[in-house]
């Protein structure tokens, strides 16, 4: 699935790890990803979290899509930041699932959280 994701690949998102119910991906904030305030546009941070969520919820095999998601921005991403997103499955029930994704950047003092994302998934019939 990730290999066919043109949007994520065009932004340079790299899939670092993928296992059942879990995924880790990264992305560097480039000049074209900052907004008028000089900080990372929230849409790009959301896209990184959403991509990582997609890799985790599709790890079980059937085609799975987002049925909803929300994000809380904790700190601003900055030009040149190397963001790392870690997705963890919280639960699966029927055709649904809930996944949490933490997006952070590495600093000399350790990881600093940029955003927290919660995604809800739904398994669908492939057309």
Image (cartoon, helix red, strand yellow):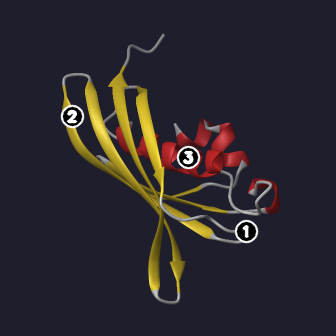
The residue wearing badge 2 is 92
Q: Residue at x 62, y 50 (%)?
A: 42
Left/right placement of residue 117 relative to residue 30 reads left
Considering depth in this image, is 60 or 80 the residue closer to the camera? 80
**Residue 119 seen:** yes
Q: Residue at x 32, y 43 (%)?
A: 99
- Circle 1 Cα neighbour tier, 10 Å, few/some/many (<14 / 14–19 / ≥20): some
Q: Which badge, 1 or 2, is on the more N-terminal residue?
A: 1
Q: Earlier in the sequence, mark 3 or mark 2?
A: 3
Q: Residue furthest top?
A: 127
Image quadrant assignment for residue 2: top right
Q: Position of residue 85 (x, y in %)?
A: 47, 59
**Sequence-first disc among 1 and 3:** 3
User: Which corner quadrant of the image does residue 37 belong to?
Assistant: bottom right
What kind of element bears circle 2?
strand
Cα–Cα span, label 1 and label 2: 36 Å
Q: Is residue 35 left or right of residue 57?
A: right
Residue receiving disc 3: 46
Residue named by callout 1: 79
Residue sitting nearer the eye, 84 or 17: 84
Q: Is residue 9 above or below residue 65?
A: below
Q: CA distance from mark 3 to mark 2?
A: 22 Å
Does dot 3 land on a helix, a strand or a loop?
Answer: helix
Dot 3, crowdedness within 10 Å: few (<14), some or many (≥20)?
many
Query: Percent position (x, y) of residue 12?
Result: 69, 55
Q: Helix, strand or loop at disc 1?
A: loop
């Amino acid at each position: 699935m990730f290999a066919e994701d043109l949007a994520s690949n065009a932004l340079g998102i790299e899939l670092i790890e993928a296992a059942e119910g879990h995924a880790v991906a990264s992305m560097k904030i480039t000049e074209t990803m900052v907004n008028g305030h000089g900080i990372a546009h929230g849409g790009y941070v959301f896209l990184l979290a959403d991509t990582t969520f997609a890799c985790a919820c599709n790890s079980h095999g059937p085609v799975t899509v987002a049925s909803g998601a929300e994000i809380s921005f904790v700190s601003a991403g900055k030009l040149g930041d190397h963001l790392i997103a870690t997705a963890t499955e919280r639960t699966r029930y029927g055709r649904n699932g809930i996944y949490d994704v933490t997006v952070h950047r590495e600093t000399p003092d350790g990881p600093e959280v940029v955003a927290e994302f919660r995604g809800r998934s739904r398994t669908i019939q492939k057309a």
